[in-house]
Amino acid sequence: MSKKDKIKEEQKTEAETATQEIEGNTTAEGTAANEKPVDEISKLKDEVTAEKDRYLRLFAEFENYKKRTSRERVELFKTAGQEVMVAILPILDDFDRALAEIKKSDEDDHFKGVNLINLKLRETLKLKGLEPINTQQGDVFDAEIHEAITQIPAPDKKLKGKIIDVVETGYKLGDKIIRYPKVVIGQ
């Protein structure tokens, strides 16, 4: 081999070595460069997932808030006149007492007039949602519905643990009890 050929061969070998080194560095740099975007992508995906979860929780919380305020608004409309109704209840009791006294006397015209006013008032209040709780002598006492003011010995064994007398009528406004019926229970 001539000197020229040797030099060419050495240059060729050096060129191949340099090319291999460059390719090796490029691959190493490419791997590092490829790892960097992958880490950033996974980090961004985690952030998006966290924000999506936060958004869904906030949305669900807002939906619950809307439902709760809607229920409260409906309940408020149902019982908006509760204070007025509670203030009128003693007047209804007075009507009942007046009718009982007038009934004892022989004044039929007075009874008819007062009874007419009483019925008109009760009908108007019924349209507004006020209803009496139907409690009668002999009904079973229920602590959820009735308020016992006293207990007396039962005149009959059948009335033991039952209502003997209704002292004050109870009323409901819609589904809510605004005054419990006051009753006497037999022992």
Image (cartoon, grey):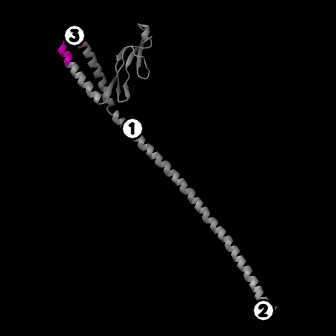
Is residue 148 placed above or below 38 in the rendered structure?
A: above
Q: Main secondary structure of the magenta part?
A: helix
Which secondary structure lies at badge 2?
Answer: helix
Q: Earlier in the sequence, mark 2 or mark 1?
A: 2
Amino acid at circle 2: Lys
Which quarter of the figure is the N terminus placed in?
bottom right
Marks 3,2: beta carbons within 8 A: no
Q: Nearer the viewer, residue 58 or 38?
A: 38
| Residue 147 located left or right of residue 97 | right
Q: Earlier in the sequence, mark 3 or mark 2?
A: 2
x, y (%) of residue 163? 40, 14
Q: Nearer the viewer, residue 5 or 170?
A: 5
The answer to whether residue 152 is visible is no
Q: Which mark is residue 72?
A: 1
| Residue drawn at the location 74% of the way across and 79% of the way down | 17
Amino acid at circle 3: Ser
Which secondary structure lies at badge 1?
Answer: helix
Q: Please state the extent of the stretch shown in magenta in the rendering.
A: 103-112
Marks 1,3: beta carbons within 8 A: no
Q: CA distance from mark 1 to mark 3?
A: 49 Å
What residue does disc 2 label? Answer: 4
Dot 1: few (<14), some (14–19), or many (≥20) neighbours within 10 Å?
A: few
Q: CA distance from mark 3 to mark 2?
A: 149 Å
